[in-house]
Image (cartoon, rainbow, N blue to C red):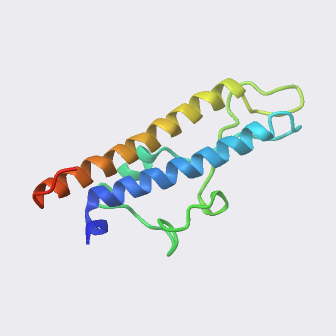
Amino acid sequence: MFEKLEIIQMAQSLAAQSGARMAIIAENVANADTPGYKAKDLPSFAETYAADPGQMRTTRPSHLTDTSPATLPMVERGRGHEAPNGNSVSLEAEMVKSVEARQNHDMALAIYRATADVIRASLGRNR
């Protein structure tokens, strides 16, 4: 019943996107010394959500349920400075992206907690 609330669905999507983004960031860091490797990233959650303001848009049946990094659309972020070996991973940029992903995940958890508190209060129960 509660999973049908739009705010819960949005928080679930935000948490899944944040987790998938952290996996891609970890892959980028692991390949920081690989010659010719281009850094990858996911589109931001805001871009994805703003693409269809009415509701989350699915592009395939498992779009919102299967969040493994291999199935999500990736964007190569090879712009900027490349190492002489063609590698475009910047550890500093990956650290910043990991902090953003962590903040988004924490925000999704805070939304879950706040929503649960509101539902409990509406039922006349305290924490």
Name the spot of residue 127 as percent of width and height, x first.
22, 50
Quarter of image, res 96: top right
Q: Nearer the viewer, residue 20 or 119?
A: 119
Name the spot of residue 14 as percent of width and height, x first.
43, 51
Decide: is 28 above or below 127.
Answer: above
Q: Residue at x 19, y 57 (%)?
A: 119
Q: Nearer the viewer, residue 85 or 103?
A: 103
In the picture as drawn, the residue positioned furthest to the bottom comes out as: 61
Q: Is residue 6 left or right of residue 96?
A: left
Q: Is residue 44 left or right of residue 72?
A: left
Decide: is 32 above or below 23.
Answer: above
Q: Residue at x 89, y 31 (%)?
A: 85
Q: Residue at x 55, y 50 (%)?
A: 19
Q: Is residue 78 left or right of residue 72?
A: right
Quarter of image, res 31: top right
Q: Is residue 108 left or right of residue 16?
A: left
Name the spot of residue 38 as percent of width and height, x first.
76, 40
Q: Quadrant of the N terminus?
A: bottom left
Decide: is 93 above or below 40.
Answer: above
Q: Nearer the viewer, residue 118 or 47?
A: 118
Q: Residue at x 26, y 47 (%)?
A: 114
Q: Nearer the viewer, residue 41 or 21?
A: 21
Q: How many discs appear? A: 0
